[in-house]
Image (cartoon, rainbow, N blue to C red):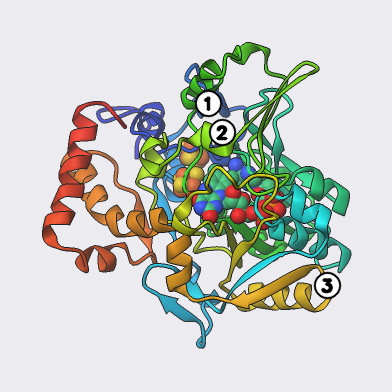
Amino acid sequence: MSDVGPGPSPIERLQAIVDQGLCIGCGLCQAVAGPAIISVGPSPSGYLEPMVVGELSHDTVDTIYDVCPGTRIDGLPPNLVGSDTILDPVWGPWRRMVLAWAADPEVRFEGSTGGVLTALAQYLLTSGRVEFIAHVTASSLEPTHGEPTVSETPAQVLAAAGSRYGPTAPLLNVAELLDRGRPFAFIAKPCDLAALRNWARHDDRVDELVRYWLTPVCGGFGPPAFTRGFLDRMGIDPATVTGFRYRGRGCPGPTRVEVGERVHEFHYLDYWGDDESQWSLPWRCRICPDGIGESADIAAADTWPGGSPDREAGVTDPGTNAVVARTVVGQELLEAAERDGAVIVERTIAPAELGDYQPHQVAKKYAVAPRFQGMGDMGRLVPVTHGLRIDELAARQPPAENERQRAGTRTRIIEGRT
Ligand SMILES: Cc1cc2nc3c(=O)[nH]c(=O)nc-3n(C[C@H](O)[C@H](O)[C@H](O)COP(=O)(O)OP(=O)(O)OC[C@H]3O[C@@H](n4cnc5c(N)ncnc54)[C@H](O)[C@@H]3O)c2cc1C
Ligand code: SF4
Ligand code: SF4
């Protein structure tokens, strides 16, 4: 496409991803264009968004549209789906599905749920399978946000345990990670994994160096205004916050806010609300075609029946992950970690049980295709997907329900709620 003449400019095309609520602030476009052209950072709304700071070409924007997880989301690369891998219509490819937790009680306690992702990452380092873990930790600049980090020791992995529900850009530093030329594991949200899998089509080093892909199952992150609203409700001035831990240290563990020396602790439900209708989510999360980490080797989830903890759960629940090994590599890792005492597996589960723990994921998976149709009706960008079965799932729904989702999406767009 010509960089001048009729039609939207490169900047307008990039901005359309943001303006239409499809950007999750992963940071990949900064790595694609280079920081001299695109800088991903906090916008006035508090979200992490790309800002054009140099000469942006249509060619670069074409590449961004091909790799951005707001515009393209694929399932597991077909070459990683084994001939004996089971394909569940909702839960996607899987080889082993278990309830498990970190064998080390400290890791289980510190972890978001049962510490399985942290335990696996530590095991990857101690067994010499990778040289470092690329994941995220609390932001050093904005306490409610996350930021990318590199862990080379089990202690560093543990220090980054826990879920960061604020804006986080795990791929900001991906060029530097690949330039190291060393094997590593990547832990990030399903959309971040989708972005890096997309980038693998442009940079051969991704498949060569990223040896393990791990993810938390993800229902969405907390919009900055929602987190500010939570702090306001709790009588805390957001500008005074010096530390913020969303969960972990029990399951879910307290939401912990530090204001200098003072520590305030709240329940997870004080942050998210007592039922799903109170969740506030970015638009991209509401139309997410893959919150279940289909492109991961291993996805780890919570196990609260009905999808939310009760108010009794807190530090007293030691935490149990549902763990889905999707690839041969993921299954081998889970079984080796179990054999070598890094992870304790309680029992095997099946997709129906996982659905009981994740009703919101099941509902969203069925609803995504008609929501995309509603976006298309309004002339919006519609993300391209492959291998996620969203049309197949919608076809199983009553037509009236699909029409309700489609019309509801149009209404949200008309009312500016995207
Ligand atoms: C935004 C978000 C939404 C979630 N929604 C759901 C849900 O709907 N259903 C459900 O079952 N579980 C959900 N979880 C996952 C759950 O909170 C646990 O993370 C998961 O069960 C793994 O637990 P663990 O104890 O093994 O993790 P830990 O051992 O604590 O490891 C967590 C790992 O994830 C990384 N990480 C944390 N936050 C982020 C982030 N924002 N971006 C990228 N990487 C991150 C950390 O660096 C760490 O390596 C969500 C997590 C997040 C971050
Ligand atoms: S690549 Fe990531 S940061 Fe850039 S526009 Fe897409 S989602 Fe946003
Ligand atoms: S719900 Fe989807 S888009 Fe939102 S943070 Fe999770 S994986 Fe990313």
Q: Work out whether 55 lies above or below 328.
A: above
Q: Which mark is residue 341?
A: 3
> Badge 1 is on which residue?
227
> Badge 2 is on which residue?
167
Q: Nearer the viewer, mark 2 or mark 1?
A: 1
Q: Residues under labels 2 and 1: Cα distance?
A: 11 Å
Q: Nearer the viewer, residue 132 or 124?
A: 124
The amino acid pointed to by label 3 is Gly
Q: Residues under labels 1 and 3: Cα distance?
A: 38 Å
| Residue 259 point in image, percent of width and height | 72, 17
Q: Earlier in the sequence, mark 1 or mark 3?
A: 1
Q: Quick one: quadrant of the C terminus?
A: top left
The amino acid pointed to by label 2 is Pro
Task: Using a 10 Å C-alpha cutoff, classify the residue at mark 1 as few (fewer than 14 neighbours), some (14 to 19) or many (20 or more).
Answer: some
In the structure shown, which secondary structural element does the residue marked by tag 2 occupy?
Answer: loop
| Residue 274 point in image, percent of width and height | 45, 39
Taking the spot 47% from the left edge, 43% from the top edge, the residue there is 220
Q: Residues under labels 3 and 2: Cα distance?
A: 34 Å
Task: Using a 10 Å C-alpha cutoff, classify the residue at mark 3 as few (fewer than 14 neighbours), some (14 to 19) or many (20 or more).
Answer: some
Q: Quick one: quadrant of the N terminus?
A: top left
